[in-house]
Amino acid sequence: MDWSPVWISLATSATATAITLIVGLAAAAWRERHSGPALAPLDGIFLLPLVLPPTVVGFFLLLLFGRHGPLGQLLLHFGATVVFAWPATVIAATVVSFPLMYITARAALEQVEPSLLQAARTLGASEWRVFREIALPLAWPGVLAGTILSFARALGEFGATLMIAGNIPGRTETIPIAIYFAVEADDIPRALYWCAVDVVISLALLSGLYYWTRTQGFGHARRLAR
Amino acid sequence: MALEVQLEKKLLDFELNVAFTASEELLSILGASGAGKTMLLRCIAGLESADRGRVALRDRVLFDSGQNIRVPVQRRRIGMVFQNYALFPHRTVAENIEFGLHELSREERSARVKALIERTHLKELAHRYPRALSGGEQQRTALARALAIGPEALLLDEPLSALDTHLRSQVEAQLQEVFSTYQRPALLVTHNIEEAYRLGERLLVLSRGRMAAYGPKEEIFRHPPTREVGQLTGCKNFSRARMNADGSVEALDWGCRLRVNQAISKPPAYVGIRAHHIDFLEARAGSDASENVFPCWLVRDSETPFRETLYLRLQPHGQEGAYDLQAEVFKEKWLRFRDVPYPWHVRLSPESLFLTPE
């Protein structure tokens, strides 16, 4: 039995979650500071991947990153093709999980009492220090929740991945894609097998993560914030 | 060596417009809620931007709308104690105090924190989180944290209002102790008249964004410049007034003629007297010979733990519930004369009465 879909799925989800965490947090923190009606469409754009069908997201990504797409052309200059290669699975998973990270991180940052940030500023702290030492630790429970949601979404990603990464065994074949093609090939035992593996992995990871965040950062930070 | 403030800022339904200087002293800023007190502090600290004006601290200009100078909050070196104390919940007392000192070396930092913790009597609590502190302890932590940066001015926003009454006097004493060694400008915002009087040397009374009074506190309390300031400083009794040719004052609402010991340049519009200055004559000694003595009748009374508030009428009959004067007497005295038959006699001493031109 070839276990590569498991490793590909895990590597893709982990990488996508890491990117989403940084980019989503940065976007949320930036948006938290810059308000105004002119920026409202931005929120719509950030949340779009959540509501659009994954096929639409995948198609847009294909147009962007494909051979003739603007980003694809740019990457070609450096001799790189991302579509139908492993990075494409990461791009798809990142884009679809981003809204969840953004929306939860932003809500968590908004919950931080403004007077705490102001107090930090009167004590001479730079904006970066205010964020890193006050806002982020206090928003941490929410940020962690966003991270779990993002990871879960990345792990379950199928449609957009299929559009831009295809199904290349050993390279872009994640568990959900392996299941789809097993069913398509009428290989029911194989499909069932991957379904069981997916359930076990998801259950183990999510319950483990959830338990860990509750006992470590999550619950602790929440008790402190009270 | 002072804090000079001149600010204008349009607020929701009035304009904040103040100009004052605080030297190395504690200046109390008294005003009802919504008078613009907190906004004033926030503008000085740099948390809000004023529309026009200038703020200078010692030789540094922090804000000057004319020259387009706006020093950011971080570099103003003004300590601020927030109304809810704004302690960082995820940091211990010591870590809260340490926050503003991160540019110092580790040794210097811990020495400074140690000294501040001793000065504010927080030694046993240094490793506690804010949630495990009482209100007074939180307030001391907030003060120590603000003092840690060696601020060139200190702003305190209602530092005692979040505390239980029984804690207040104790915390107030500790605040005074800290201030006795802090030789720089400090502004204390409060809506509590007694707090403002006890803590500050001078007083600034703020009303809807304007300075209604500004000066030595004794002077403002003895002779409020306007009726509004009189009311804001707790005076309950005012009557429209007119000066008579012989120098006596006609109190139009009270329907009596008064002698007042106050030289004024402008004709008086009102005459006032504080509730506790109204003197009850238990035996009508000297009868008519005594000036400013009037018969009175009780309309109703209300009880506080140690004093009795009496609502009095200067005529035997009048509209139901209407009264002329509100007086306050100690319970002991009240118990002595409550059963004396009407009319009672009150004396409005010429020294206690004051006149205001508006």
Image (cartoon, rainbow, N blue to C red):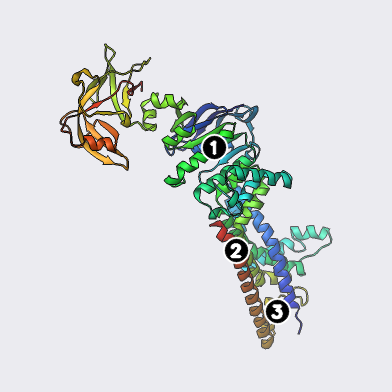
Front in this rendered view, residue B339 or A111: B339
Q: Can residue A171 be seen in this view?
A: yes
Name the image quarter holding residue A45.
Answer: bottom right
Name the image quarter holding residue B195.
Answer: top left
The amino acid type of the residue labelled 2 equals: Phe
| Numbered tag placed on residue B248 in the rendering | none
Q: Mark 1 points at which residue?
A: B177
Residue B149 position in % (x across, y down): 65, 40
Does residue A195 appear to the left or right of B340 in the view shown? right
Q: Are marks 3 and 1 on the same chain?
A: no
Q: Name the residue under label 3.
A: A178
For disc 3, the neighbor class at 10 Å (few under 14, some 14 to 19, many from 20) is many
Q: Are marks 2 and 3 on the same chain?
A: yes
Residue B79 position in % (x across, y down): 59, 39
CA separation, marks 2 and 3?
35 Å
Front in this rendered view, residue B234 or A7: B234
Residue at point 59%, 54% (across, down): B128
Does residue B204 appear to the left or right of B252 in the view shown? right
The amino acid type of the residue labelled 3 equals: Ala
The amino acid type of the residue labelled 1 equals: Glu
Going from N to C along the chain, the mark reached first, 2 or 3, is 3
For disc 1, the neighbor class at 10 Å (few under 14, some 14 to 19, many from 20) is few
Residue at point 58%, 54% (across, down): B129
Outermost residue to the top: B245
Name the image quarter holding residue B121.
Answer: top right
Question: SS class of the residue under badge 2?
Answer: helix
Question: Pointers 2 and 3 in contact (CB under 8 A)?
Answer: no
Q: Name the residue under label 2.
A: A218
For disc 2, the neighbor class at 10 Å (few under 14, some 14 to 19, many from 20) is many
Question: SS class of the residue under badge 3?
Answer: helix
> Which tag is nearer the camera, tag 2 or tag 3?
2
